[in-house]
Image (spheres, helix red, strand yellow):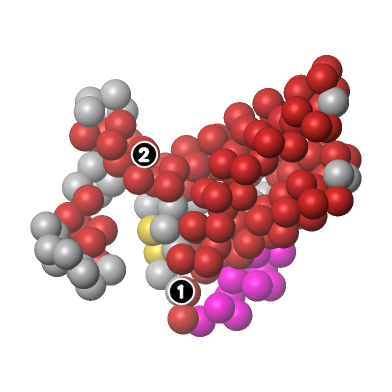
Amino acid sequence: MKQLFSFPNPVNDAAARSVALGVVTMSVVAFATGWAWLLIPLTYGFLARVATGPTLSPLGQFATRVSGPRLVSWQRFVPGPPKRFAQAIGAALTVAATATWLSAGWSDARWILLPLILAASLEGFLGYCLGCTIFGWLIRAGLVPDSVCAECGDLSKRYAAAGHAVGTEQ
């Protein structure tokens, strides 16, 4: 039986990208319409995914059960720890936006969504996880132990898996 407070490792990249596209959609709608209440499901979703992976996240459940399996060209498995780190960044941004909304109003809070929209767009549309890249830097800097994710600190493996030669301009 799977533990409730665990995060999958590896993670299906198609599901991760599906979640990112859901985050982009909700964030853009909130930003454009002023529907600050969308911060509540956004914040809950990030906190749930950090704590339990997709288990308690409605968007995570949709991504792993419905949309992710149908995105055949995006199917590949990637390490879980950097994806959890990326979700934690999203959680920090949405908690900050929610706290700002409640204390200072929507006009200040909405701007906190811009870095979230950018990062989630990179993940969802291009398959580039900014949080995963930062996680790799933290491992290489010695701030996160190699044992957390051995393949994460060696970016050359990621480039090779993506079909790029390290150190060459594409």
Q: Residue at x 46, y 81 (%)?
A: 73
Q: Amino acid at mark 2?
A: Ile
The residue sitting at the front extreme is 107
Q: Are marks 1 and 2 in contact (CB under 8 Å)?
A: no
Q: Residue at x 29, y 24 (%)?
A: 143
Element type at mark 1: loop
Q: Position of residue 112 (x, y in %)?
A: 66, 34
Residue mark closest to the camera, 1 vs 2? 2
Screen quadrant of the C terminus: bottom left
Label 2 sits on residue: 134
Q: Which residues are magenta?
A: 62-72
Please tell me the numbered disc located at residue 75: 1
Looking at the rendering, which quadrant does residue 52 occupy? top right
Q: Position of residue 159 (x, y in %)?
A: 23, 61
Q: Would you say the magenta stretch is mainly helix, strand or loop?
A: helix
Q: Position of residue 152 (x, y in %)?
A: 28, 46
